[in-house]
Image: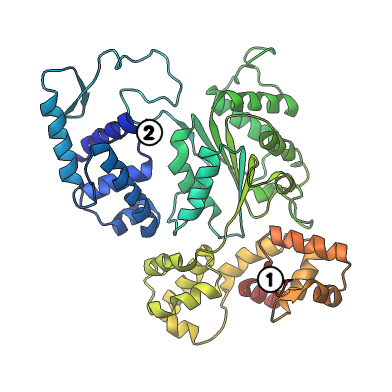
Amino acid sequence: MDVQEVLRFADEMVFAKTGEHFDDLQKAILLGVWEGQKYSQIAETSYCSEGHIRNIASKLWKLLSNVLDEEVTQSNLRSALERRQLFIVSSNFGNDFLHIGNVNVCTDTQASEVPKTRSPSTPTPETSEPQTRLDLADAPHISLLSDRTSELATLEKSIVQEKCNLAAILGISGIGKTALSLHLTRQIQHNFECVIWRSLRHSPPLETTLKNLIQFIANQYPPNPPLPRGGEEGVLPTSIPDRLSLLMEYLRKNRCLIILDDVQAILSSGQLAGNYRPKCENYSILFRQIGETTHNSCLILNSWEPPREISALKGENLPVRTLQLKGIGTAATEIFQQKRLLNPETWENLINAYQGNPLWLKIVATTIQEIFRGRVAEFLKYDMLFLGEELAATLHTQINRLSELEKKLISQLSREANPVSVEQLLKDAELSPSELFNGLQSLGRRSLVEIEEQENETLFSVCPVVRQYVISNPVN
């Protein structure tokens, strides 16, 4: 069998046993191992960590072991599949066959009859993949994802198994929200009839976003999709309420996955977190409708901060979920390996200094390579947090969005060498309790303040990188 025949054969065997097809990452592992690649090579071509590949591969071998009724490992994959092929062909010689590549699999003639009509997501005999329609024109190029196994599992459980209506992936700029969403989309897309990725980077009006979503889900383009009931045939409604009603009807009839990236672009600067820019306020209606009503679809939001409705609607057992992304910890060593940094015994210090933020670490790793030829130990001798213009520019965009109250509070926190209590902040920042609570809550939603507990007291601080930026670039 050639490599594609292997994939088709194994996929049909698994589907016959479980009713599910391989996802893209399982296929990449199967094909890579068949061709003799190491997990590290598969990880590089799949843009994810070696640890994640090993985890998925372990589950894949268990799955195949169950399907083939023998232990399957990385080392015996080829022989196990070849044995099963030989067994099927020899034991069913002379019977009715289903042709898979060059492999004949016995099948019941009546069961193999195919209905004339199928939903877009139903597998057909001509393909082993569900016919998911994809519109990823706005999606960026998929990049390396350092180990986010836990986050991927959490999101997949919420969206696929528990069928939540809305999931918001939140975190400071550079933490990896978009990369995580791209890999998640590839991992779960076969569970949906259509997948749509849209960027709100340029703050499109809601009318435009609704039109684009409706046209793709309806699979009809100009002269516009017809209304499902009433109205003039072939005419898309002009009012936002009517377009929202039409979209929700499609989301109830179809299983759709919609990803809205750069949601912070429709949120305002100069106000507390979660408020909308002028002319973007009606997005709140869309988010509420999707979060509160019953339908078969899911909306993923990627944002620096949650829109105000999300904070009120979210809950562990509710249809609206949020995931606050943190740094990647020791998984960041993959970035250093890519950048060919030296002195691996010092890498943990570098990760801690830059809070495991993938973008920050890529920026500083490039600096270390260009100035110190990759010698991390030499860079760390200077005992300083180097920001540089590129890192400072990413922080400027986010800090510049703060309200005057938040700027005053983050300036005060940046002057503190150690975490401080609410009582101390009330005294030093000269704020009323109401102002302080609003400011701390908003900074927390923007991932710009850290909270810890000491002796039954809540303490607040900002991370060293943000502190360094605020001290060097006063915001008051």
x then y, percent, for residue 314: 68, 46
Q: Residues within 10 Å of mark 2 (few under 14, many from 20)?
A: some
Q: Which mark is residue 24?
A: none
Q: Quadrant of the C terminus?
A: bottom right
x then y, percent, for residue 83: 14, 38
Q: Nearer the viewer, residue 39 or 92?
A: 92
Q: CA distance from mark 2 to mark 1?
A: 45 Å
Q: Which mark is residue 20?
A: 2
Direction from residue 449 to residue 278 in the image, left or right: right
Q: Quadrant of residue 313?
A: top right
Direction from residue 37 to residue 234 in the image, left or right: right
Asked whether residue 453 is in view, the answer is yes
Q: Report the residue at 60% width, 59% height from top.
A: 173
Please name the residue that numbered disc 1 is placed on. Answer: 453
Quick one: SS at disc 2? loop
> Tags 2 and 1 in contact by the CB under 8 Å rule?
no
Q: Quadrant of the N terminus?
A: top left
Q: Report the residue at 25% width, 17% height from top.
A: 108
Q: Report the residue at 55% width, 72% height from top.
A: 354
Q: Quadrant of residue 254?
A: top right
Q: Report the residue at 37% width, 68% height from top.
A: 337
x then y, percent, for residue 431: 87, 69
